[in-house]
Image (cartoon, rainbow, N blue to C red):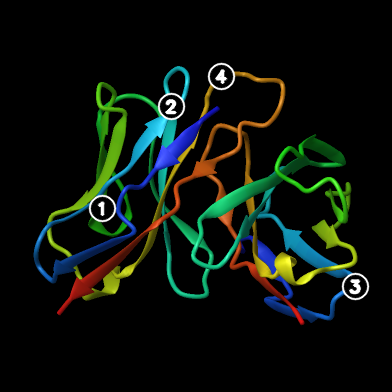
C-alpha cells in the first residue's frame, strides 16, 4: 500500500504564474487535508476535503487559492497568480475516517521567484 | 478554539540519556492527541496517539507519551536517546466533538531535538 503521494516534490514558479499541487491519498482513504509550512514554522491547516466535497476551508486564503478532490483522480491545490509569500512547503495528509491519525505525504516545496 | 503549545524550540540531549519533548494543549472536552516527527526535507511521520484509555501511550521507535489531563499536557519521552532521533517533533490536537465541519489537526510550532554523540 503506497503512502500519500504528492507531486511535484519541488515546484518553481515566477510571480503571477499558477501553481498546481497534486495529492493522491493512501488507498482506501477518503479524507484529504492540506497544510502549509512556512520556513521555521509549524504546519497550518488550509483545507479539508472528502470526495467531491470541501468540508472545511477555513484555513485557506479567500483569494487565489482553491482546492478540489474529484471523484476520480488526485486532490489538487491550486494557487493562482503566485506571490513570493506563497513560497512554502505544502503537505497533504489523508485518513480513512476522521477520528484516526492522518498520514502525510513528503510535501511539495513551492518556490516563487 | 483548540491550540497546542510546545514551549521549547530546541532540546539538546546526550546520546543514551532520557529525553522529554514538552507539549501542552487547550481544547474543549477530551482531546485526541498526536505526535509526529519530521526529518529534513521530508513529510511528517506518525509516532503515536492518545484517544482514550491508558494515560501512557507507546509508539514507534521506542517513544512514549504521557497524557496528563489535570496539567493538559502530553509530553513525549524516550528512555535512551539515539543520534538518529535528531529531528523536528510536532505535537497535535484534534477536538473530538462533532462540529459540523472538519476536526482538523492543530499543530504546535515544533521542537528541534538534537541528540549529541
Q: Are marks 2 and 4 on the same chain?
A: yes
* Image depth: mark 3 or mark 1 in front: 3
In which image quadrant can residue A54 be found?
top right
Q: Residue at x 45, y 52 (%)?
A: B109
C-alpha distance separating marks 2 and 4: 9 Å
* Image depth: mark 4 or mark 1 in front: 4
Q: Residue at x 52, y 75 (%)?
A: B41
Disc 3 marks which residue? A16
Estimate the x, y position of residue A7 in percent, counting from the top left.
Answer: 73, 71
Q: Does the CB distance between marks 3 and 2 fall below 8 Å? A: no
* Secondary element at image label 4: loop
Q: Is residue A82 left or right of residue A84?
A: right
Visible residue check, residue A41: yes
In which image quadrant can residue A112 be found?
bottom right
Which image quadrant: the C terminus of chain A?
A: bottom right
Q: Which mark is residue B63?
A: 1
Q: Which mark is residue B31?
A: 2
Disc 4 marks which residue? B97
Amino acid at each position: 500500500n503506497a503512502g500519500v503521494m504528492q507531486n511535484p516534490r519541488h515546484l518553481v514558479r515566477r510571480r503571477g504564474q499558477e501553481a498546481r499541487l497534486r495529492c493522491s491519498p493512501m488507498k482506501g482513504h477518503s479524507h484529504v487535508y492540506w497544510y502549509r509550512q512556512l520556513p521555521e514554522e509549524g504546519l497550518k491547516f488550509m483545507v479539508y476535503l472528502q470526495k467531491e466535497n470541501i468540508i472545511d476551508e477555513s484555513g485557506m486564503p479567500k483569494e487565489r487559492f482553491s482546492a478540489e478532490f474529484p471523484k476520480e483522480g488526485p486532490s489538487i491545490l491550486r494557487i493562482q497568480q503566485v506571490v513570493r509569500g506563497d513560497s512554502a512547503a505544502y503537505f497533504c495528509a489523508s485518513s480513512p475516517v476522521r477520528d484516526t491519525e492522518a498520514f502525510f505525504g513528503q510535501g511539495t516545496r513551492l518556490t516563487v521567484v | 478554539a483548540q491550540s497546542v503549545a510546545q514551549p521549547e524550540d530546541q532540546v539538546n540531549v546526550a546520546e543514551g540519556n532520557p529525553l522529554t519533548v514538552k507539549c501542552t494543549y487547550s481544547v474543549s472536552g477530551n482531546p485526541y492527541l498526536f505526535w509526529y516527527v519530521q526529518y529534513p526535507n521530508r513529510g511528517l511521520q506518525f509516532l503515536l496517539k492518545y484517544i482514550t484509555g491508558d494515560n501512557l501511550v507507546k509508539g514507534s521507535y521506542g517513544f512514549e507519551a504521557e497524557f496528563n489531563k489535570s496539567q493538559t499536557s502530553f509530553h513525549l519521552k524516550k528512555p535512551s536517546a539515539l543520534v538518529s532521533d535528531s529531528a523536528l517533533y510536532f505535537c497535535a490536537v484534534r477536538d473530538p466533538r462533532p462540529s459540523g465541519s472538519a476536526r482538523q489537526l492543530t499543530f504546535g510550532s515544533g521542537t528541534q531535538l538534537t541528540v549529541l554523540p
